Image (tube, grey):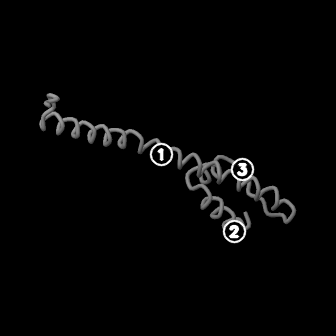
Amino acid sequence: MDLGIGLKEILFFALGLCLLYFLGYIILSPFSLLMKFILSAFLGAAVLVVINLIGANFGVTIPVNPATALIVGFLGLPGVVLLFVLKLILGI
């Protein structure tokens, strides 16, 4: 019983599936990186707000301005820690 499907067609189908997989990977990789960046920035901003709310009782607040927003936006949670340590060391 011959279905009319030869080895050549099966190989082309497998090659097409592999190309489709790699194309999807190339398209979705930047999206995944962007989502990680957005999540990190959101988490950093939330921690910055919490530090300002709790730190107000102890006299330690980090002002929210364009510079601190960029640092927290790019670095996320490590950026908040950096700003907090700089605030404690420099007393700005």
Q: CA distance from mark 2 to mark 1?
A: 37 Å
Residue 3 picture location, percent across and down: 17, 29
Q: CA distance from mark 2 to mark 3?
A: 17 Å
| Nearer the camera: disc 1 or disc 3 | 1
Seen in the image, is 60 located left or right of residue 86? right
**Type of the residue with mark 3:** Val
Residue 52 picture location, percent across and down: 78, 56
Looking at this view, is 51 or 6 the one in front? 6
The residue depicted at 47 percent of the width and 47 percent of the height is 33
Residue 48 against residue 14 in the figure, above or below: below
In the picture, the disc for residue 90 is 2
Q: Earlier in the sequence, mark 1 or mark 3?
A: 1
Q: Secondary structure at mark 2?
A: helix
Q: Earlier in the sequence, mark 2 or mark 3?
A: 3
**Type of the residue with mark 1:** Ser
Q: Secondary structure at mark 1?
A: helix
Seen in the image, is 60 located left or right of residue 19? right
CB contact under 8 Å: marks 2 and 1: no
Q: CA distance from mark 1 to mark 3?
A: 28 Å
Question: How many numbered circles does the render carry?
Answer: 3
User: Disc 1 designates what residue?
Assistant: 32
In the picture, the disc for residue 46 is none
Seen in the image, is 6 located left or right of residue 44? left
Residue 6 picture location, percent across and down: 12, 34
Quadrant assignment, res 24 = top left
Q: Earlier in the sequence, mark 2 or mark 1?
A: 1
| Nearer the camera: disc 2 or disc 3 | 3
